[in-house]
Amino acid sequence: MNPQVERAFVRMADVGHRYDPSPDAPMAVQDINLEIHRHEFVAVVGPSGCGKSTLLRMVSGLLVPSHGEVSVFGKPVDGPRDDVGIVFQKPTLLPWLNVRKNILFPLKHKYGRYSRADEKRAEELLAIADLEAFGDKMPDELSGGMQQRVGIVRALLLNPDILLMDEPFSALDAMTREQIGFDLLKIWDEQPKTVLFITHSISEAVLLADRVLVMSKRPGTVLDLIDVDLERPRTAETINHPRFGQLADRIRKHIYEPEAVV
Ligand SMILES: Nc1ncnc2c1ncn2[C@@H]1O[C@H](COP(=O)(O)OP(=O)(O)OP(=O)(O)O)[C@@H](O)[C@H]1O
């Protein structure tokens, strides 16, 4: 496990949720018991509709589960949290603001202003994301991958303890996607966060995460929580490691031939 991982941070105890409150309506997720450590990188994979986004929304506090409890550092999550950054599939940058103003926008929106220190940190984060030369550019002057990196920097500028990422790279081509994965690991290494990362890509999950949470089809439950015992830093070479293939196979079996997994 990553040495930066400290201790249990996010806890889900017997968590379940049904969107339709009538008692015979189907559950979206059920019987979720999970502990995520501080600064751990957990990837979530599972079939479409199994409740991955539901899980993320419950950690963010945007959704209160109908059963069980989600807590962060021992305190129940009962409403939207301040210490959470969210990155979605599309970065949704404001087209009329340059990159620098886009990443500072949430601070301005939240506090009405931002300080010189915030501006300095914005420049530092842009540099970590290899975007230091693009602060003055408008979003439509950037590639899709660069826009997505701006979205990640924007989420990090609020210095959240928890970074929730919902299929953040799925709109990108394969090469950009792999590169931005390594960029994310570099940012995470320099600015450790507890990351919950949803993906449909098994190899992306294994390449990035400390652990991979595999969910069953609806109602989503935890099928497996797999330790990714591959060395860091992860590189393009990691993919050629025999252990990488074994881990990816194990996840693939859960998803495509669950009866074959003992
Ligand atoms: N707001 C909602 N109201 C009612 N049902 C919902 C709502 N949001 C999600 N659901 C249902 O809950 C289940 C889980 O949805 P969720 O979006 O969490 O799955 P997912 O694993 O993230 O899916 P995908 O991989 O396709 O994005 C689905 O059956 C979905 O139809």
Image: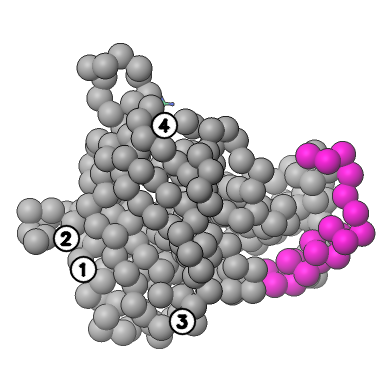
Q: Ligand 1 within 8 A of label 1's CB? A: no
| Residue ID for mark 1 | 249
Q: Is disc 4 in contact with disc 3, using a CB cutoff of under 8 Å?
A: no
Chain part drawn in magenta: 110-131
* Picture colour scheme: one colour
Location of the N terminus by quadrant is: bottom left
Give me the residue at 23% from left, 46% from top. 216
Q: Any mark on residue 253, and which?
A: 2
Frontmost residue, 147 versus 187: 187
Assign the magenta stretch its main secondary structure: helix
Q: Secondary structure at mark 1?
A: helix
Q: Amino acid at mark 3?
A: Arg
* Element carrying mark 4: loop
Q: Position of residue 66 (x, y in %)?
A: 38, 27
Q: Which dot, 4 or 2, sits closer to the camera?
A: 4
Q: Nearer the viewer, mark 4 or mark 3?
A: 4
Q: CA distance from mark 4 to mark 1?
A: 32 Å
Q: Contact (CB < 8 A) between labels 2 and 1? A: yes
**Residue, disc 3:** 232
Closer to viewer: mark 4 or mark 1: 4
Distance Cα–Cα, label 4 vs label 3 = 35 Å
Q: Quadrant of ligand 1?
A: top left
- In the image, is residue 14 part of the stretch drawn in magenta? no
x%, y% of residue 69? 41, 38
- The residue at label 3 has a CB less than 8 Å from ligand 1: no
